[in-house]
Image (tube, rainbow, N blue to C red):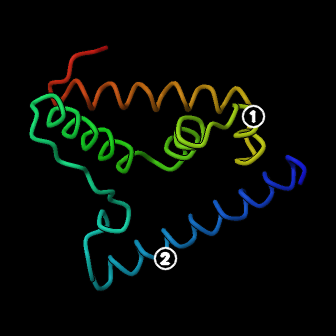
Amino acid sequence: MTPSFFAENFAIAAGKWKNMRCKLFRRQSIAPEFPLEDWTKTAIVQSPTEDAAQNAIQQQVIHNAVVEMKDKFRIPLILHYFDNFQTEEIAQVCNIPVGTVKSRLHKARALLKKSLAKEGFPHE
């Protein structure tokens, strides 16, 4: 498989995900069935230690901040930090310039930092 084959398939999957999400929001506005967060939420493993509890809270704050981000910031952030895509690959998948990917990653990091500071977590 060539990198372009992977990028094309990922672009199709990302488009379908966006369409499904738009459809869900339209349906939720007409007749709410369940909270929107339920279908994206991941389980947090609880531990009895204070550090583990603090980490779990921080993970939840990060998760909430990512979920609340606009797609144009969330998609590059997830692709870069969770799927280990390079900026050039993200640009190809999202069909945007590399500079735009870099600026969106910068803005997404700033939004995460702001969310953590608002919840009382120090800058590290």
Q: Residue at x 46, y 32 (%)?
A: 108
Q: Residue at x 25, y 70 (%)?
A: 35
Quarter of the picture holding the N terminus: bottom right
**In the rendered image, which quarter is residue 104 located in?**
top right
Q: Alpha-carbon neighbours of circle 1 within 10 Å: few (<14), some, or many (≥20)?
A: few
Q: Residue at x 36, y 31 (%)?
A: 112
Whole-percent x and y of residue 46? 17, 47
Q: Secondary structure at mark 2?
A: helix
Q: In the rendered view, would you say 9 is above or below 122?
A: below
Q: Name the residue beneath numbered marker 2.
A: 23
Whole-percent x and y of residue 120? 14, 25
Give the alpha-carbon distance from disc 1 to disc 2, as whole Å.
28 Å
Q: In the rendered view, would you say 59 is above or below 44?
A: above
**In the rendered image, which quarter is residue 26 located in?**
bottom left
* Marks 1,2: beta carbons within 8 A: no
Does residue 57 appear left or right of residue 28 in this picture?
A: left
Q: Amino acid at mark 1?
A: Pro
Q: Amino acid at mark 2?
A: Lys
Q: Residue at x 15, y 42 (%)?
A: 47
Whole-percent x and y of residue 38? 29, 67
Whole-percent x and y of residue 39? 36, 68
